[in-house]
């Protein structure tokens, strides 16, 4: 599995920050994806499907309420407790779209979500970020 397998189509994956809060990153078809995430593509896709079936547990707080475009899908994910980031086409970075008012903690998530989120650990706090630039190893 490599990046060309998902190139040009929206593809979502998970990450966890240093406090155990979880984010969903959407590639907009062109954002960078870490090799470890790509290597476990099938499980990541199952995790995203499971996330979509989770109940709404909180409210989504838009990072920029005046941002043009329809971000209802990102708000729906954030209302399940996840930070949401979207790749700014063409050159990034991943920009914060919404923050959950009560973020989910990784230890309270189902196994498939915990496993997928732990593929990408971010040594920062999502609560303090407005954007996220992934630096991938060659």
Image (cartoon, rainbow, N blue to C red):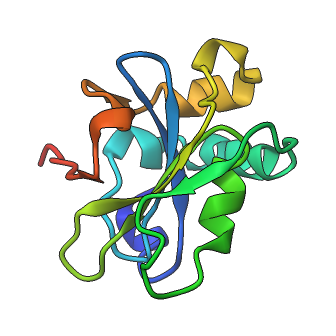
Relative side of 113 to 27, left or right = right
Q: Position of residue 137 (x, y in %)?
A: 14, 43
Identify the image quadrant of residue 128: top left
- Which one is nearer the viewer's eye here, 1 or 50? 50
Residue 45 appearing in the image = no
**Left or right side of 98 for 34:** left
| Closer-to-camera residue (17/129) | 129
Q: Residue at x 48, y 25 (%)?
A: 118
86 vs 23: above or below: below
Q: Is residue 92 visible?
A: yes
- Toward the top, the furthest residue is 107
In the rendered view, tell whether residue 107 sits above or below residue 134.
Answer: above
Tell whether 88 sits left or right of 25.
left
Q: Is residue 22 above or below residue 49?
A: above
Question: Which residue sits at x=15%, y=47%?
Answer: 135
Q: Position of residue 13 (x, y in %)?
A: 52, 50
Residue beneath the point at 58% across and 74% down: 71
Query: Residue 9 at x, y = what percent?
Result: 51, 79
Image location (x, y in percent) of residue 40: 53, 41
Q: Which residue is farthest front?
A: 66
In-image side of 91 versus 3 (left or right): left
Quarter-of-image position of residue 125:
top left
Q: Nearer the viewer, residue 112 or 83?
A: 83
**Residue at x 63% of width, y 31% of height:** 102
């Amino acid at each position: 599995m490599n990046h060309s397998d998902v190139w040009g189509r929206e593809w979502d994956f998970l990450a966890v920050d240093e406090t155990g809060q979880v984010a969903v990153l959407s590639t907009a078809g062109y954002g960078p994806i870490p090799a470890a995430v790509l290597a476990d593509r099938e499980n990541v896709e199952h995790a995203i499907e499971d996330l979509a079936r989770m109940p709404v547990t909180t409210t989504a707080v838009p990072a920029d309420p005046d941002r043009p475009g329809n971000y209802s899908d990102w708000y729906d994910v954030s209302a399940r407790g996840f930070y949401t980031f979207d790749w700014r086409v063409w050159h990034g970075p991943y920009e914060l779209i919404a923050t959950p008012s009560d973020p989910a903690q990784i230890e309270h998530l189902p196994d498939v979500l915990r496993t997928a989120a732990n593929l990408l650990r971010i040594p920062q706090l999502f609560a303090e970020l407005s954007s996220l630039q992934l630096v991938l190893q060659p």
